Image (tube, coloured by chain):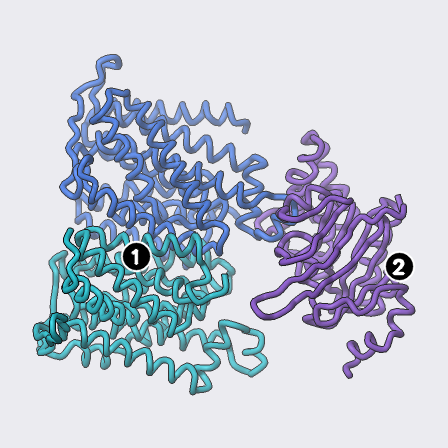
Chain colours: A blue, B purple, C cyan
């Protein structure tokens, strides 16, 4: 399937999703749907680096936070539209990705992963000590009730934005998979020495993957302040973002764009249900256990069950 | 093609790992179109030399010139793009890619950076290369399905896919049957004679190296101790001592 | 910010003691990451497990935390052996230690944290012992036993491990497995078995590290994460697997953190370790004593 056709299919799927949401017409559906969509973007973004090139990023909250806190700053200082804030948050987050990659990717792969863990804590400390965005007390964002020119509730608008970002992320991931870049990423995952010997500029490609991955995570985080209306460092840097974002592609399957979507929808929905019916701590425990279970028992994820 | 112009010039090349001197002051010239054999006991620095030539390791001192151009500071992938390809002693295929896709990588990343190739030409070239090494029927298989000799052939085909002017074949034919060794040697000679590719062969099996090489270089403990006609070199006392133990 | 000598001196001394404690926390990682090349980012979770065991025994039966930890060490060793077995079969032999192996440990870290939260809540827990509270005074310098005892226990632990690794056959095999698995196989030792023992040892140290942690500070389930950066910073800076290097790096970090906390405020202290780690990875990945 050619890319334009694929994007058309994605848009149709998105339109159906939004139509369904309008039909249900329940604010909870939008709130829950937003979270699932956000995880589609996050896990797709993570998989561009993790699944395609094999480099594990644990610093997901740091990238989300760059997007979210750039929105807080822009909200306080400008009257930019949300879409522009997402673009800025994404760009800053992409820079963070490239910067981290540049500093650590020339070393052994595991150092990159450890560095991303460290980076999240450094960022959290910086934000906690940054009074302009509320410091440890957090920041309140007043969410407009409606979006005038579309004539819909703001939560519907956020849902729509996240739907658009999901299309963007998934279409990008799929386009990479079938391209020269995608083949280059795969050689990095398989054998970097052999990749270099075959003419693949591994460092450059890894930086591209870091930038793309970080950029999408930042974009996913940018609307977050409007969604939660109260943003504090402790919950923004929560480990559950990292666990979910890593678990979803690994459970769905890392080899293809479909894996992260499968993982995000299944795990995201499961968590929404478990949080309501049991407790949020138990639902997180389930995610952790599933993650460990899948990496041991089903290394190819759910997608692996359908391949021979 | 087989002019007197050196394709590769190595001068004063040294490499140390901490306090251990892996290569000391290596001088080496390879003429375009030549078939050079490089031998030496285990740990003599052969692989280190290959890695320094290809840019996988950085040498502390000395220079490597390829077609007259200094290679200092050029990464491995840049050297491959300029026309220097290598095979690895232990085959390192891309495990999640099919055989055809394995060969696609150098075409996309080395050949295409020099001149553009339409998609159909790439596919055809992959199949031609697989046919050359007799793996065309397994084009859509994964490397894990290959035997040891097939793996070696894939490794060579991938190096050839980069369309090199100089091929550094770090071979390890130990464990292959005589027939299989001859197959690989025949392939290498054919590449050299028909396509004019300069080849440096690194190999342990003396019979193979002798039948292949026009010139033989011997490394012992990081130093070059002999360089010349294979028949003369193997009679040299220090070479005999290094191989048979003194 | 007024830099007084007393303040600086005390920050230095308690930083030194803190460093001793950090060495105990790191030593497990020096074995697993430094010697075996297993990136066990879940190590702090096992340390916390040690803390909570010390807490339970102390709160319910009044047992001494350090004695409890020593008694619990065989159980931790067994846990480590079991985990290495899973890791070996599922990831090392499949050649997938990077993506899935790392995620496995990340999952373990997370499960432990959430499970501890479910059982104990997010309240800080602490232990009681005779040496928590009293402080020795030398002129203007204070030596709180709460810090001194953990530092001494750490040094004792390091000395024991060092003797074990350098004097026994298995210990030497552990050091060999890092450098040359082939040579080890020639010695007719099974690398898997040696690694299993070594990983078991690394987890066993977490029992003791957990006990000294809860002596030094009250614990809650999420503080383990703060230690990830610390222990990897120390381990890398110390030169991966060198005990002497680990101790020196741990002391440097302890002193730096303490000075930062004293003069800039405790909320900046966590960034010191992680910033340190980032800088180390970026500019001196071979450690302070390594050849660049």
Please give left or right for residue C159 compared with residue B5 in the image. Answer: left
C173 to A279, vertically: above or below: below
Q: Position of residue A55 (x, y in %)?
A: 46, 49
Please give left or right for residue C237 compared with residue C4 in the image. Answer: right
Among the 4 quarters of the image, the one containing residue A70: top left
User: On residue B214, which mark appears?
Assistant: 2
Q: Which one is closest to the eye, mark 2 or mark 1?
A: 1
Q: Residue at x 40, y 62 (%)?
A: C236
Residue density around tag 2, few if under 14, some if 14–19, many if 20 or more, within 10 Å: some
What distance separates the C-alpha of mark 2 from that of mark 1?
59 Å
Q: Nearer the viewer, residue A102 or A164?
A: A102
User: On residue C197, which mark appears?
Assistant: none
C284 to B105, vertically: above or below: below
Which type of secondary structure does the marked residue at label 1 adopt? helix
Inspect this view and state whether residue C208 appears: yes
Q: Position of residue C120 (x, y in %)?
A: 14, 61
Q: Residue at x 37, y 65 (%)?
A: C235
Question: Do labels 2 and 1 touch, CB within 8 Å?
Answer: no
Chain containing mark 1:
C
Among the 4 quarters of the image, the one containing residue C122: bottom left
C47 to B115, vertically: above or below: below
Q: Nearer the viewer, residue A51 or B229?
A: B229
Inspect this view and state whether residue A261 appears: no
Chain containing mark 2:
B
Q: Position of residue A268 (x, y in %)?
A: 29, 41
**Dividing the image into 4 quarters, which one contains the C terminus of chain B?**
bottom right
Which type of secondary structure does the marked residue at label 2 adopt? loop
Please give left or right for residue A122 compared with residue A193 in the image. Answer: left
Residue that badge 1 annotates: C273
């Amino acid at each position: 399937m050619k890319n334009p056709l694929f994007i058309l299919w994605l848009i149709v799927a998105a339109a159906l999703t939004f139509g369904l949401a309008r039909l249900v017409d329940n604010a909870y559906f939008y709130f829950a749907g937003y979270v699932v969509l956000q995880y589609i973007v996050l896990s797709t973004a993570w998989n561009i680096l993790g699944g395609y090139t094999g480099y594990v990023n644990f610093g997901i909250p740091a990238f989300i936070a760059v997007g979210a806190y750039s929105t807080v700053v822009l909200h306080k200082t400008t009257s930019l539209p949300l879409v522009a804030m997402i673009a800025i948050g994404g760009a800053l987050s992409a820079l963070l990705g490239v910067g981290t990659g540049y500093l650590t990717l020339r070393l052994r792969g595991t150092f990159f992963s450890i560095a991303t863990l460290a980076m999240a804590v450094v960022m959290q400390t910086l934000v906690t000590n940054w009074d302009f965005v509320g410091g440890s007390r957090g920041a309140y964002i007043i969410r407009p009730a409606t979006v005038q020119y579309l004539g819909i509730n703001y939560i519907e608008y956020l849902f729509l934005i996240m739907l658009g970002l999901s299309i963007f992320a998934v279409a990008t991931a799929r386009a990479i998979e079938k391209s020269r870049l995608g083949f280059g990423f795969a050689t990095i995952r398989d054998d970097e020495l052999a990749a270099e010997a075959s003419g693949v500029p591994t460092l450059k490609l890894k930086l591209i993957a870091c930038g793309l991955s970080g950029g999408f995570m930042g974009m996913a985080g940018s609307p977050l302040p409007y969604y939660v209306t109260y943003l504090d460092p402790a919950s923004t840097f929560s480990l559950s973002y990292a666990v979910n974002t890593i678990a979803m592609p690994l459970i769905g399957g890392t080899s293809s764009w479909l894996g992260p979507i499968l993982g995000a929808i299944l795990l995201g929905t499961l968590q929404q249900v478990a949080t309501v019916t049991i407790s949020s701590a138990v639902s997180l425990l389930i995610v952790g256990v599933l993650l460990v279970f899948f990496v041991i028992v089903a290394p190819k994820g759910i997608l692996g069950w359908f391949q021979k | 093609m087989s002019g007197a112009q050196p394709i590769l010039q190595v001068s004063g090349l040294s490499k140390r790992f901490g306090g251990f001197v892996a290569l000391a002051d290596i001088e080496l010239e390879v003429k375009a179109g030549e078939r050079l054999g490089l031998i030496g006991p285990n740990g003599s620095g052969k692989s280190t030399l290959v890695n320094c030539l290809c840019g996988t390791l950085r040498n502390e001192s000395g220079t490597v010139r390829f077609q007259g151009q200094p290679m200092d500071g050029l990464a491995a992938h840049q050297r491959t793009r300029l026309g220097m390809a290598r095979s690895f002693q232990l085959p390192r295929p891309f495990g999640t890619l099919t055989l055809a896709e394995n060969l696609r990588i150098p075409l996309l990343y080395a050949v295409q950076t020099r001149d553009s190739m339409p998609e159909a030409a790439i596919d055809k070239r992959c199949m031609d290369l697989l046919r050359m090494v007799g793996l065309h029927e397994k084009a859509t298989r994964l490397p894990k399905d290959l035997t040891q000799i097939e793996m070696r052939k894939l490794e060579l085909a991938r190096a050839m896919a980069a369309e090199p002017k100089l091929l550094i074949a770090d071979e390890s034919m130990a464990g292959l049957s005589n027939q299989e060794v001859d197959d690989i040697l025949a392939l290498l000679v054919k590449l050299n004679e028909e396509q004019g590719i300069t080849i440096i062969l690194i190999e342990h099996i003396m019979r193979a190296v002798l039948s292949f090489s026009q010139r033989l270089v011997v490394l012992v403990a990081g130093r070059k101790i002999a360089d010349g006609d294979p028949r003369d070199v193997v009679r040299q006392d220090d070479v005999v001592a290094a191989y048979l133990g003194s | 910010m007024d830099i007084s000598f007393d303040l600086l001196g005390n920050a230095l001394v308690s930083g030194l003691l803190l460093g001793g404690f950090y060495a105990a926390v790191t030593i497990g990682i020096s074995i697993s990451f430094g010697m075996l090349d297993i990136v066990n980012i879940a190590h702090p979770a096992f340390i916390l497990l040690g803390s909570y065991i010390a807490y339970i025994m102390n709160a319910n039966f009044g047992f001494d935390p350090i004695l409890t930890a020593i008694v619990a060490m065989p159980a931790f060793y067994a846990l480590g052996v079991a985990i290495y077995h899973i890791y070996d079969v599922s990831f090392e032999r499949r050649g997938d230690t990077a993506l899935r192996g790392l995620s496995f440990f990340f999952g373990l870290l997370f499960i432990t944290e959430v499970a501890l939260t479910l059982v104990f809540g997010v309240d800080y827990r602490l232990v009681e012992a005779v040496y928590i509270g009293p402080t020795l005074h030398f002129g203007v310098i204070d030596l709180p036993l709460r810090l001194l005892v953990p530092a001494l226990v750490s040094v004792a632990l390091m000395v024991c491990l060092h003797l074990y690794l350098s004097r026994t056959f298995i210990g030497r095999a552990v050091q060999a497995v890092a450098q040359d698995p082939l040579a080890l196989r020639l010695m007719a030792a099974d690398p898997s078995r040696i690694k299993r023992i070594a990983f078991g040892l690394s987890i066993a140290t977490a029992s003791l590290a957990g006990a000294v942690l809860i002596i030094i500070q009250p614990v809650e389930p999420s503080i383990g994460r703060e230690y990830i950066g610390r222990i990897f910073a120390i381990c890398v800076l110390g030169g991966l697997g060198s005990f002497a290097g680990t101790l020196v790096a741990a002391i440097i970090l302890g002193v730096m953190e303490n000075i930062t906390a004293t003069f800039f405020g405790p909320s900046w202290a966590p960034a010191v370790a992680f910033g340190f780690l980032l800088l180390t990875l970026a500019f001196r990945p071979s450690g302070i004593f390594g050849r660049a």
